Image: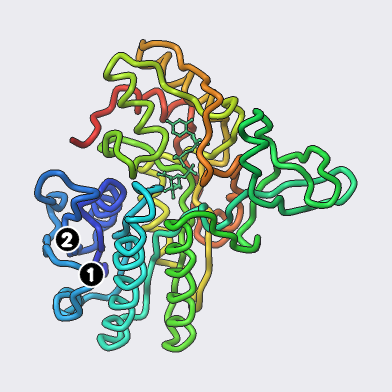
Amino acid sequence: MTHILVTGGAGFIGSHVTAALLAAGHDVTVLDCGHPAAHRTPPQAPPGAVLRRADLRDPAAVRDALRGVGAVVHQAALVGLGAGPQDLPEYVACNDLGTAVLLAAMAEAEVKRLVLASSMVVYGEGAYHCAQHGPVRPAPRDPADLAAGRFEPGCPHCAAPLSPGLVGEDAPVDPRNVYAATKVAQEHLAASWARESGAAVAALRYHNVYGPRMPRDTPYSGVAAIFRSALEQGRPPQVYEDGGQRRDFVHVDDVAAANVAALRAGAGFRAYNIASGSPVTVGEMAGLLADAFGGPRPRTTGEFRLGDVRHVVAAPARAAAELGFRAAVTPADGLREFACAPLRA
Ligand code: UD1
């Protein structure tokens, strides 16, 4: 049993992680500032955990929260695409300055184990294969192609259509929006901290997380919450592009279990895909949710967002081999449950 500090432990993923750590027999302190992008009501820690309401950017508060702690599970972050460039300083301040303050305080307190909530957005586009050129990395999609309904990225050498594959943790990072850039920076800061202090960092690259208590539709929400909110309001989910974009939707209970397992990671920095291993298209996901909810059929709009990537689908083998983590919930079962699960206000 270890005393664990969970940053962001009052949030959607953090509260499930906290509950799983408590169930595994750990003591948990939650550090959460109740950021207005994530909380419309005062933050609460799950029963059994102690809540310290403070901002990660406050070194004295972080030092205080680390007393007696043996490991940190760092979930606190601004997520999603945000409202626009005016959000840039707050993303960098919360996600990167906050992580830097945390790492400095951990070094001082000699806490040498960190589980970091990272994201598959660090990859940019997923893995692709060209029949002629083998594995390739497509350039960001051209707005003119998207406007013409050409959503699949082409080969950077011959422009031929590509087949999407499984992205492994050794793929180069290629952040394509502000949030993604802050997650890459968190990983790099944590990796250099691990080298300098001989610490262990497991960076968990979450794929598309969903589950009970997911926040409702906001500029910071992922697509599963947006579709659920639409169905609740009697509106059809609006599926962008042609609905053929592929993602791996992973249940929050599995993400929580992965965090518990990641406390066993060895020394140094190591990244892990955290995914269900059963990818679906966004169009299929919308259909599954609408059927299970009993709501209107999804509408495929052909609209697009420039920051979006086409396919990101994980190779989940490393987490299985090194952490013993395998997702237990299939998207078919989990999305059916999620269709009627409570969302957070
Ligand atoms: C999402 C999260 C990201 C998180 C990552 C991994 C957002 C904005 N992105 O990235 O923060 O790190 O998962 O967990 O929260 N779409 C629709 N209709 C909509 C909204 C979106 O069809 O109303 C489509 C998008 O065009 C995209 C796909 O759904 O193709 C996924 O969108 P989204 O969940 O927003 O972003 P991800 O890139 O998957």
Q: Is residue 78 above or below residue 307?
A: below
Q: Quadrant of the N terminus?
A: bottom left
Give the residue drawn at x 45%, y 12%.
297
Q: Which residue is mark 1?
A: 56
Of the numbered discs 2 and 1, the one sitting upstream in the chain is 2
Q: Is residue 68 visible?
A: no
Secondary structure of residue under mark 1: loop
Q: Is residue 152 visible?
A: yes
Give the residue drawn at x 79%, y 37%.
161
Tell me how far mark 2 sits from mark 1, CA to CA: 8 Å
Which residue appears farthest toward the right when viewing the image? 132
Q: Quadrant of the C terminus?
A: top left
Q: Position of residue 111 (x, y in %)?
A: 31, 81
Secondary structure of residue under mark 2: loop
Q: In the shown orientation, is residue 6 left or right of residue 235? A: left
Q: Nearer the viewer, residue 334 or 320?
A: 334
Q: Nearer the viewer, residue 125 or 114?
A: 125
Q: In the shown orientation, is residue 133 left or right of residue 311? A: right
Ligand 1 has an atom within 8 Å of the beta carbon of the residue at disc 2: no
Q: Is residue 310 above or below residue 125?
A: above
Q: Position of residue 203 (x, y in %)?
A: 46, 64
Q: Which residue is mark 2?
A: 33
Q: Badge 2: few (under 14), some or many (20 or more) residues near its Cα, within 10 Å? A: many
- Kind of residue sitting beneath label 2: Cys
Q: Badge 1: few (under 14), some or many (20 or more) residues near its Cα, within 10 Å? A: many
